[in-house]
Amino acid sequence: MSTLVKTLQRPLPPVKTAYAVYFGAVMLILGMLIGPYIVPEREASSHIGMGVDHSDHLTHDHTGGHGLLNVPAGAAPEVRLTARRDDILGWNILLETANFRFAPEAVNGAHVPGHGHGHIYVNGEKIARLYGPAYHLSDLGPGEHVITVTLNANDHSIYAVDGEEISASVTVGGPLS
């Protein structure tokens, strides 16, 4: 048997738990630091702080090919959005909804009136789905940023009334208060 095969067949020395935790934490932090720079180019524009100009957010189409789901005004879901600066980093996004229930268990399923999830956008670019009324956004970088949330049915279509999407927006950023 070759020396290489014998070497590979030897059992590994025991690793202390503290070293394993430390190594795991270092790898996690390293991945978080370099991850945004190694995403495929087609996804890079959806990452915040990558130098993409999003100044056209007011005309950006949030439907993403999913279309609008028009509902009667009286039964339409409602959403209110607030953003609070996090004491450590970023922003805490809080939603208040009416006539709407977050239903993460039914995502990609059939439409159930008043059920679904949200989509969150920063400067017109979708960054995540929302399966509940709270979300933490990491540091968005300098300047002002427009955060928008749409309410979406299980099939991802955007709830709308008379062709107008049901959404809420808030502008954040600038100097610390």
Image (spheres, rainbow, N blue to C red):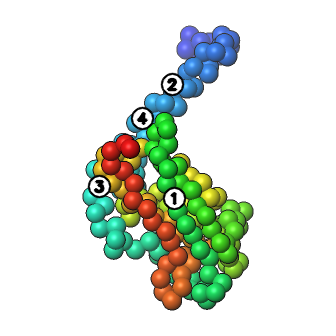
| Residue in view at x 39 percent, y 59 percent | 171
Pointer 4 or 1: first along the chain: 4
Residue position marked by numbered label 3 in the rendering: 52
Using the rendered view, name the quadrant where residue 156 is placed: bottom right
Q: Determine whether, in the image, residue 68 is placed left or right of residue 54.
A: right
Q: Which mark is residue 33?
A: 4
Q: Are marks 2 and 4 in contact (CB under 8 Å)?
A: no
Query: Compared with residue 24, is residue 40 higher up or lower down, i.e. above or below?
Result: below
Distance between the alpha carbons at the discs numbered 3 and 4: 18 Å
Residue position marked by numbered label 1 in the rendering: 82
- State the residue in front, 171 or 32: 171
Q: Secondary structure at mark 2?
A: helix
Residue 87 in percent (x, y) is at: 49, 38
How packed mark 3 is, by other alpha carbons closer than 10 Å (few <14, some 14-19, many 20 or more), is few
Pointer 2 or 4: first along the chain: 2
How packed mark 4 is, by other alpha carbons closer than 10 Å (few <14, some 14-19, many 20 or more), is few
Residue 162 in percent (x, y) is at: 51, 89
Q: Residue furthest front?
A: 177
Instruction: Name the residue type under label 3.
Output: Val
- State the residue in front, 169 or 39: 169
How packed mark 1 is, by other alpha carbons closer than 10 Å (few <14, some 14-19, many 20 or more), is some
| Residue in view at x 39 percent, y 54 percent | 172
Pointer 3 or 2: first along the chain: 2
Residue position marked by numbered label 2 in the rendering: 26
Distance between the alpha carbons at the discs numbered 2 and 4: 11 Å
Distance between the alpha carbons at the discs numbered 1 and 2: 34 Å
Q: Are marks 1 and 3 in contact (CB under 8 Å)?
A: no
Q: Are marks 1 and 2 in contact (CB under 8 Å)?
A: no
How packed mark 2 is, by other alpha carbons closer than 10 Å (few <14, some 14-19, many 20 or more), is few
Residue 152 in percent (x, y) is at: 58, 72
